[in-house]
Amino acid sequence: MSHECQSILFAPNGRLLCEMASVSADFHHGQVIPEHAHPEDQLLFASSGVMALSTKQGVWVVPPMRALWIPANTPHSVAMSGPVSMRTLYFLPKLCRRLRGKCFVMNVSSLLRELILHACKFKRLNKKTLAERRIIEMIVDQLKAVDSIPLQLPHPTDSRAMRVVKALLADPGDQRDLERLCEDCGASKRTIQRVFREETKMNFGKWRQQLRLLHGLQLLASGEKVTTAALEAGYSSPSAFISMFRKQLGTTPMRYLADGNGCEQSGN
C-alpha cells in the first residue's frame, strides 16, 4: 500500500514555507524505498549510482548524472543499483509548468547539475529571499530546455499481458520466445502482440529489448562486468549487448555510466 507523504513545502496549518526544498541521502546497493507519493513535483538526481523508479505505469532507470521528473501525487518506489548518492528537489506544483505531467528521465547539463548540487545545500528555498529566488528561477529556467532520454519501460494494464511482463521482470534473460511465454501465461500470441502495441506503444520485441537494456545497465552499476551483464540480460555475447547499447544510447555502456553528458567525446 502506498504511503502518502506530508508536504515539506507547507506547514501543518497550511502556511507556505517555501517554493522548493531538498533532501540528500546515500544508499547501499540493493536498498529499496517502498512505494510512496509526494504532494510536490519532484526532481530525482543521481549524483552517483543507478536508481530504478517503479510505478503502475512502468519502470524508469536513472543512470549517474541524469535525473528523473516525478509529477506530484505519483505513487512510486525506488531501487538502488550500486552505491547511490541521491539528490532530490521538491517543487511547488505548477512551478515548472512546461514539464509534462508524466515521469521521464532527462540529461542534465553541467550548469543544471551544479545548480542542483548547490540547491541541496539548502533545506528550503524561499522566493522571498533574493539569493534563493535566483537559484529557484535558474533551475526552473534550465528545466525548460532538458532533453528526455529513452530509459523507461512502460507496462501494459491488461492482466494477461502483465503475466508475461512479470515473468520477464523476474528473469530478463529468459530465452523463451513469445509463443512459449504466452502458452505458459495462458494467453494467445496475437492478443499479447496487440496489447503491447496498443498499451505500451512498442511491439513486444522492442519492449523486450528495452527491458534487457535497462537490466544490463543496472547490473553494470552494481559492479558486474560487461560480459556478465550481457549474458544475464539475455544477449548471446558482450559485443551484441554493446552494439545494441550504442544504437540506443549513442555510446558504450561503461562510457555512458562514466560520462554525465551521455555521449561520446569527439576524437575518442
Image: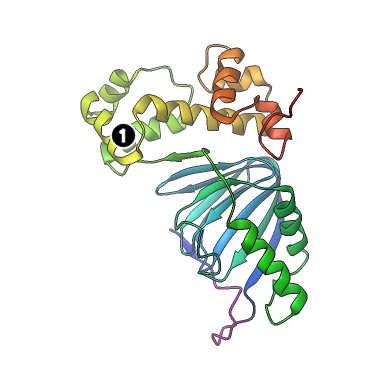
Q: Residue at x 75, y 69 (%)?
A: 122
- Residue 126 in percent (x, y) is at 68, 77
Total numbered labels placed on residues in the image? 1
Instruction: Classify 10 Å Cα crowding around label 1: few (below 14), some (14-19), many (20 and above).
Output: many
Q: Main secondary structure of the magenta part?
A: loop
Residue drawn at x 53%, y 38% as measured from the top left:
151
Along the line of sight, the residue nearer the viewer: 13 or 102: 102
**Residue, disc 1:** 196
Colour convention: rainbow
Observer able to see residue 123: no
Horizontal placement of 41 versus 135: left or right? Answer: left
Residue 8 left/right relative to 180: right
Q: Position of residue 251 (x, y in %)?
A: 64, 26
Which residue occupies 40% across, 49% down? Answer: 56
Magenta highlight on residue 9: yes
Q: Secondary structure at mark 1?
A: helix
Q: Position of residue 245 (x, y in %)?
A: 57, 25
Residue 175 visible in image: yes
Quadrant including the C terminus: top right
- As for residue 148 lying within the magenta part, the answer is no
Q: Amino acid at mark 1?
A: Phe
Say which of 155 and 256 sits in front: 256
Question: Which region of the structure is painted magenta?
Answer: 6-16
**Above-or-below relation of 174 to 23:** above
Q: Nearer the viewer, residue 57 or 83?
A: 57
Q: Is residue 180 left or right of residue 144?
A: left
Q: Position of residue 121 (x, y in %)?
A: 78, 64
Locate the N terminus and report the quarter of the image it occupies. Answer: bottom left
- Choose top left, top right, bottom left or bottom right for residue 217: top right
Residue 47 horizontal side relative to residue 189, left or right:
right
Residue displayed at 55% across by 21% down: 232
